[in-house]
Amino acid sequence: MHIAVCIKQVPDSPTIRIDEERWTIIREGAKNIINPLDHVALEAALNMRAREGGEVTVLTMGPPQSEEALRESLAAGADRAILLTDPAFAGADTYATSHVLATAIRKLGPFPDLVICGMQTIDSDTGHVGPQIAEELSLPQVCGVIEIHPEGEFLTVKRVSDGFLETYRVRLPALLAVDQKLTAVRHLALGALQVAFS
């Protein structure tokens, strides 16, 4: 199974400052981390690869320093990592971000059986990117996923919506936007990080 994981490097919450004139995040001087729900998506992909076999490809769109997030993903166990960066991407909204990521996913070989991303990011909190990627790639999608059970060409997934537990059977390829409850994120050994950043 080929799993693509979309991640985003975001400012760590305590270091976020807002430009009150433009209502944008001031990223200079902020500590950057992998978006917490994207970390859950990566962990879910690595767990699924351990059970089902295959490979995990991580993609991110961002400035050159986003390479740090990709190196951390490789240290966690991802097979390959792709940075999509261009000055033209600066200030991209969710539609532009989704288009760039979907275009890159479309060019992956082989095309992924599954695309996983976090349900939302802590810097914008829109929850738009995953569903927009799915629409652009014409993939079935489920958001807010808290359980994933592979069954050959299908997945059985669960989510909670308005207090109700919902179960879906989804044919692959598909896109899942995951919730924090899906899995715990393991802590990386210092040695793995040293190798990834050397």
Image (spheres, grey):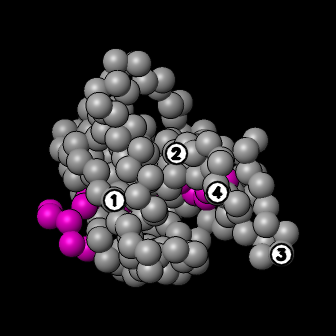
Which is nearer the N-term, disc 4 or disc 1? 4
Determine contact: label 4, label 3, CB under 8 Å.
no
24 vs 158, nearest the viewer: 24
SS state under label 4: loop
Q: CA distance from mark 4 to mark 2?
A: 14 Å
Q: CA distance from mark 3 to mark 1?
A: 30 Å
Residue at 48 percent of width and 23 percent of height: 187
Q: Mark 4 Cα within 10 Å, few/some/many (few <14, many 20+)?
A: some
Residue 157 image offset from top left, x and y in percent: 47, 51
At label 3, which amino acid type do we have? Answer: Glu
Q: Mark 2 Cα within 10 Å, few/some/many (few <14, many 20+)?
A: many
Which is nearer the N-term, disc 2 or disc 1? 2
Residue 44 image offset from top left, x and y in percent: 42, 40
At label 2, which amino acid type do we have? Answer: Ile
Q: Which residue is mark 3?
A: 21
Q: Is residue 144 visible?
A: no
Residue at 83 percent of width and 75 percent of height: 21
Disc sitting over residue 27 in the figure:
4
Which is nearer the N-term, disc 4 or disc 2? 4
Disc sitting over residue 83 in the figure:
1
Q: Which residue is mark 2?
A: 34
